[in-house]
Image: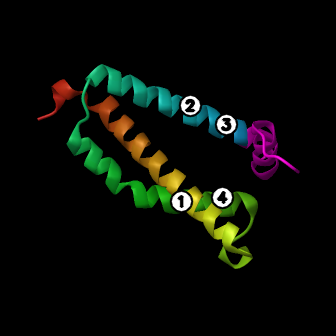
Amino acid sequence: MEELSFETLIAVFEEVFGTFLFWSLVVVAAVITIGYIYVLIRDRAVSWRKFLLAQLSMPVGAVAAIYFVFWVTKSGFADMGGPIDIIVLLGVGLAGAIGAAILVYTVQSMIAPPEQES
């Protein structure tokens, strides 16, 4: 593999997660992202109380993402072989943290729109 392309990345992710699980995760991420954009446009402002609660969910999202990847790949911390594995692990944790924050903020905003807040 001489150069990294988008198609190569998709093929690698499909191989790691399986085709069905990978595309299911893509669809779920797209739906959550569309919901988040909808909430931001609808509210026309960020609710800092909801944002703080969403940030508090970030460590849980990071741990859940790492655990999920270890579970899917049937591996663990003992299988990590070098610095790139640590970098990938940190990236997975960061993506899980950001995803959890976006999910929590979106769900909170869908359940309690701004006019219902105290």
Pick the front one: 28 or 2: 2
State how the image is colored. Answer: rainbow
At horizontal 31% and vertical 32% (from top left) the residue drawn is: 109
Location of residue 13 with respect to 114 vertically, above or below: below
- Say what secondary structure mark 3 lies in: helix
The x and y percentages for residue 110 are 34, 29
Q: Relative to 19, is 76 on the left or the right? A: left
Q: Earlier in the sequence, mark 1 or mark 4?
A: 4
> Label 4 is placed on what type of residue?
Val
Say what amino acid the circle numbered 3 marks.
Answer: Ser
Residue at x 81%, y 42% (from the top left corner)? 8
Q: Left or right: where does residue 68 sit relative to residue 95? A: right
Question: Most extreme residue toward the top, as rendered?
Answer: 42
The residue carrying mark 3 is 24
SS label for mark 4:
helix
**Contact, mark 4 vs mark 3 (Cβ under 8 Å):** no
Task: Check disc 1 and give the amino acid type.
Answer: Gly
> What residue did someone put label 4 on?
69
Sequence-first disc among 1 and 2: 2
Q: Nearer the viewer, residue 71 or 82?
A: 82
Mark 2 element type: helix
Image point (40%, 47%), residue name: 101
| Residue at numbered disc 2 | 30
Residue corresponding to mark 1: 93
Residue kind at label 2, given as amino acid type: Ala
Front-most of residues 67 and 101:
101
Q: Residue furthest front?
A: 2
